[in-house]
Image: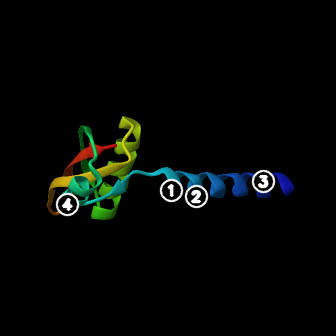
Amino acid sequence: MKFASGIVAALVMGSISFGAFAAKEITKEDVAKMHLTKIGTITTSTKTSPMDAKKDLSKKADEKGGKYFVVIAGQKNEKDVHANADVYK
């Protein structure tokens, strides 16, 4: 029983720490104010909701080494959400 509780606690702590380091969505105005450097562009598609697309963009920005991302284009059709974002550090 204690072993299972330990695993659950580790998973919860891992998800909390991931959120603390996830790239944050900002606006173009924020980029200018903060004097950030663009390090690339990312794309997401086939996500079922805008929230899922944001999570995927944040994950991909993290993988590129970015701290922030700005959504530059997005489209939602019947089933999917497609979005492009610039990544900054």
> Is residue 67 or residue 45 the one in the foreground?
67
Quadrant assignment, res 12? bottom right
Closer to viewer: mark 1 or mark 4? 4
Q: Position of residue 22 (x, y in %)?
A: 44, 51
Alpha-carbon neighbours of circle 1 within 10 Å: few (<14), some, or many (≥20)?
Answer: few
Query: How many angstroms separate mark 3 from mark 1 (CA)?
Result: 20 Å
Closer to viewer: mark 4 or mark 2? 4
Position of the N terminus by quadrant: bottom right
Q: Amino acid at mark 3?
A: Gly
For label 2, the SS is helix
Q: Seen in the image, is 53 located left or right of residue 21?
A: left
- Identify the mark at residue 6; answer none if there is no mark: 3
The mark that comes first in sequence, 4 or 2, is 2
Which residue has dot 2 on it? 16
- Identify the mark at residue 9; answer none if there is no mark: none
Q: Amino acid at mark 2?
A: Ile
Which residue has dot 4 on it? 29
For label 1, the SS is helix
Query: How many angstroms separate mark 1 from mark 4 (CA)?
Result: 24 Å
Which residue has dot 1 on it? 19
